[in-house]
Image (cartoon, rainbow, N blue to C red):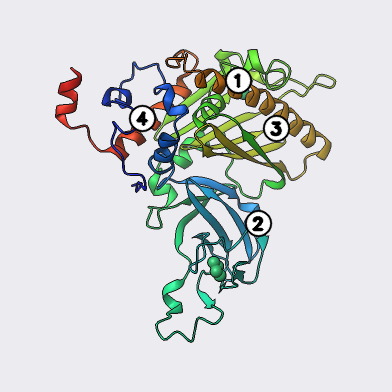
Amino acid sequence: MPVSLTPCSIGDLGLDWRDIEDRPDNFQSLPVHTYLDPAVFEFELDAVFAGRWQFFAPLAKLSAPGDCVTGEVGRVPVVVVRGDDGALRGFVNACRHRGHPVVKEDACRRRLVCGYHGWTYRLDGALIAARDAESDPDFCREALSLLPVAVDQWAQCVFVNTDPDAAPLRRAHPRLETLAAEGGFDPDPERYHLHREAVIDIAANWKLWYDNGVECYHCPTLHGESFAAAFDVSPERYVAVLTDHLMNSHFAPATARDDDGDTLRSKRYCSFQLFPGCQLIQQDDLAVLARIVPTGAQSCRFIAHYLSERDADPKRVEAWIELWHRTYDEDTDAVERQQKGLWSGRVPRLRYVPAREKPALFINGLIREAYREALGEAPPAAWAALG
Ligand code: FES
Ligand SMILES: [Fe+2]
């Protein structure tokens, strides 16, 4: 379970137990200050993002011995490395000397050499050289290996859990494979190759971007000339299954339409999501593997890796990516404006439409559940006091 570096009580977060109660008829968001308050953001890094499996990188970026991918998982800097023995390992990307990142950017390395004072680690994390430190009789290299995080792999994806003792991904999410298959998601790691990636910095709380990425209520209004022009987004076509921190969704087959001149028309769309923040999409020529990284109370980052079918026409792949970028630009503009509305202090709560925004309500329920787990059970006296 997540370990909080910011011990706090529900009162410290400006909440009461009713705010995080498990009630299926609660169609409102958490209080709006949870989208603004740095203390809540710090709490969420531990309560929501620590100790849970999160998509980290496409497998294709870690195919050869020495391949390293860096990133943040919650508050933890992480590097995942393909070892000489072929195994994938993950480490806290902080040197055991004085905490500088050992690997500053994605690369292929024979050794992991910290750029600050040159301490050198093997690909399996063992410290093998610490300049001028060996003369110290108390210096014990063996005790100063890089600290591990848990790594697992499924489909085209590498996942990280910052808890090194975490149960493997499939044990933590026993329905992962069947639910993905039921949603039409193809786990074959050979189906795609890496095309390129996009990093989008968004001036909005991560929960707003998350809501936006799971519901399609906004598709006809916001994406009329982008996403909604290529996909049949009518509600009767949209199918979403929500269970066990997982979500699959697709448009029913009748959506298949032929390309119309310059307009792309989708023949296949399925998405698969793993809480928190992992969004995997397969459509036509493309797969989009993406994750949400919270970067501040009022900011987040969306990292999307585009993979293309091995025999796809590169021009068509680029056309699809262009369509996704237009769609993401529209989403970014919407949530940044939304954030300004919340920042005004004049918006009391967000009120969802259950008929069209079940996935957003589902995600909000999981966030409340994470809050409850981190804060412990409400003392009976607290409920009594609330009446
Ligand atoms: S912090 Fe890495 S060698 Fe000093
Ligand atoms: Fe959108």
Residue 290 in the image, given as x and y percentages of width and height: 60, 39
Q: Which amino acid does label 3 sit on?
A: Asp
Q: Which amino acid does label 1 sit on?
A: Arg
Q: How far apart are marks 4 and 3 (CA)?
A: 35 Å
For the residues labelled 3 and 2, say whether their Cβ atoms are less than 8 Å apart: no
Q: Is mark 1 on a helix, strand or loop?
A: helix
Residue assigned mark 4: 368
Q: How far apart are marks 4 and 2 (CA)?
A: 34 Å
Q: Sequence order check: which comes first, mark 3 or mark 2?
A: 2
Residue 189 in the image, given as x and y percentages of width and height: 62, 49
Residue assigned mark 1: 337
Task: Answer whether residue 123 is visible to the viewer in this image.
Answer: no
Q: In this view, does 64 lie above or below 28?
A: below
Q: In which quarter of the image is residue 324?
A: top right
Residue assigned mark 2: 106
Task: Classify 10 Å Cα crowding around label 4: few (below 14), some (14-19), many (20 and above).
Answer: many
Q: Is mark 4 on a helix, strand or loop?
A: helix
Task: Answer whether residue 45 is visible to the viewer in this image.
Answer: yes
Side of 378 relative to 165 (left or right): left
Task: Classify 10 Å Cα crowding around label 2: few (below 14), some (14-19), many (20 and above).
Answer: some
Task: Classify 10 Å Cα crowding around label 3: few (below 14), some (14-19), many (20 and above).
Answer: some
Q: How far apart are marks 1 and 3 (CA)?
A: 32 Å
**Foreground mark, 4 or 1?**
1
Q: Distance between the residues labelled 3 and 2?
A: 29 Å
Q: How far apart are marks 4 and 1 (CA)?
A: 25 Å
Q: Which of 257 and 382 is in front in this view?
A: 382
Q: Sequence order check: which comes first, mark 4 or mark 3?
A: 3
Identified at 32% across, 27% down, the residue is 15
Q: Nearer the viewer, residue 189 or 295?
A: 295
Residue 284: give its label: 3
Side of 284 relative to 7 (left or right): right
